[in-house]
Image (cartoon, grey):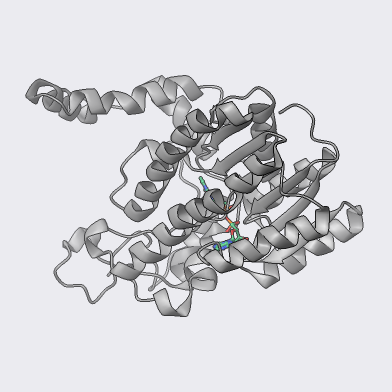
């Protein structure tokens, strides 16, 4: 897809962070944009911005786990802008940090529900409508570079993202005959407000967590997020990816090399020799290339983590204090 002007974009999570950056860039490219988001405060902030720019942006309050709500949002898009979207961008997402062995059903239900379930709901709601409209178009999702690794301290998240990546690859193959392109946007750290999600976005009914979550703890993540890629720059990368029909959009100079390095572990997992090689590699000091890759992904030097808040209730990525069966090093003090 090379021409954006006059076409319609539907962006989930479009009121904040990566999604808000996408709404800005696609509106500036002349698109009519729907932003769909669960947070009214985020919608209000985003719409204040768009009222000033005068861009044709319409906001819909939508929880991406709500299938009936999704169908209603698709109908509303057709009513407001006259047609189903040409560009669907599934960006709404949340995360939760803590040792995987401390995860509750609610930790899995919340993260998988939004990150994987929300993407499935978007695809099942909109793809048939886009095919029926017969104009081709484009589908993208904001996945995460986390899709390429298993991370025991954010496991429901990385599992959800790997599943989304795999799903998108199937849609990419399947939608070609309809003239609909597909891209998976896989950034690492983003300068967004995802650090708020565990407290402000997580529904009351799913608040039972095995992780140590407090305002103080989340403030640690906020510091790290600040060094991440700017949402507008990220959206520009996605736009270029769409223009060039590139399936994997990884917004860093070393993208191909990163994936090559991260994927070789699967080959190593297949033999005892490979398992030994993996262990040996872990003992080696980081190479210059690894340091460079870290810098590109995180926005700071490997050995110079930004100063994080300290305090009695800080224990980021740790289990809840009362889980006495979790290994002491994984437990908040
Ligand atoms: N922040 C990072 O470091 C990072 C890194 C890689 C990928 N991502 C991914 O980028 C995407 C956007 O996240 P962000 O970092 O911009 O976070 P963000 O919190 O700044 O923005 C996400 C938006 O999604 C909305 N949202 C959350 N749950 C929702 C739901 N159930 N229904 C509808 N909207 C919902 C939020 O209200 C928010 O406005 C996510 O999929 C996230 O996993 C983030």
Q: Quadrant of the C terminus?
A: bottom left
| Residue at the extreme left | 272
Residue 196 quadrant: bottom right
Residue 315 appears in view? no
Q: Is residue 99 left or right of residue 233?
A: left
Residue 134 appears in view? yes
Residue 181 quadrant: top right
The vertical placement of 75 against 19, above or below, is below
The vertical placement of 148 against 317, above or below, is above
Residue pictured at 66% horizontal, 51% vertical: 11
Q: Quadrant of the N terminus?
A: top right
Residue 298 drawn at (x, y percent): 50, 39
Ligand 1 in which quarter: bottom right
The vertical placement of 136 against 322, above or below, is above
Residue pictured at 52% horizontal, 60% vertical: 195
Residue 48 quadrant: bottom right
Q: Is residue 253 left or right of residue 95?
A: right
Residue 318 drawn at (x, y percent): 31, 62
């Amino acid at each position: 897809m090379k021409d954006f002007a006059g076409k319609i974009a539907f962006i989930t999570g479009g009121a904040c962070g990566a999604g808000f950056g996408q709404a800005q860039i696609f509106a500036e490219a002349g698109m009519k944009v729907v932003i769909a988001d669960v947070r009214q405060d985020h919608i209000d902030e985003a719409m204040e911005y768009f009222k000033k720019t005068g861009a044709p942006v319409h906001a819909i309050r939508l929880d991406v786990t709500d299938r009936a709500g999704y169908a209603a949002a698709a109908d509303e898009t057709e009513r407001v802008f006259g047609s189903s979207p040409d560009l669907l961008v599934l960006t709404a997402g949340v995360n939760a940090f803590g040792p995987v062995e401390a995860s509750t059903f609610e930790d899995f239900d919340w993260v998988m529900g939004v990150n994987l379930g929300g993407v499935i709901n978007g695809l099942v709601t909109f793809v048939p409508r886009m095919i029926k409209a017969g104009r081709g178009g484009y589908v993208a999702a904001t996945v995460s570079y986390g899709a390429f690794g298993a991370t025991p301290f954010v496991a429901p998240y990385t599992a959800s993202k790997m599943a989304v990546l795999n799903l998108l690859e199937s849609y990419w193959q399947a939608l070609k005959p309809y003239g609909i392109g597909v891209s998976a946007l896989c950034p690492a750290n983003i300068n967004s407000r995802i650090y708020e999600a565990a407290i402000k976005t997580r529904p009351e009914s799913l608040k039972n967590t095995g992780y140590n979550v407090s305002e103080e703890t989340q403030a640690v993540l906020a510091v790290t997020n600040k060094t991440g890629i700017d949402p507008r720059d990220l959206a520009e990368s996605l736009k270029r990816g769409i223009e060039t029909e590139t399936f994997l959009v990884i917004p860093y100079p070393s993208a191909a090399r990163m994936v090559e390095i991260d994927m070789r572990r699967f080959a190593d997992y297949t033999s005892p020799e490979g398992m030994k090689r993996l262990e040996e590699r872990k003992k080696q000091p980081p190479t210059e290339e690894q340091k460079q890759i870290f810098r590109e992904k995180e926005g700071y030097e490997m050995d110079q983590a930004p100063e994080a808040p300290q305090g009695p209730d800080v224990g980021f990525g740790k289990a809840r204090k009362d889980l006495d069966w979790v290994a002491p090093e994984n437990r908040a003090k």
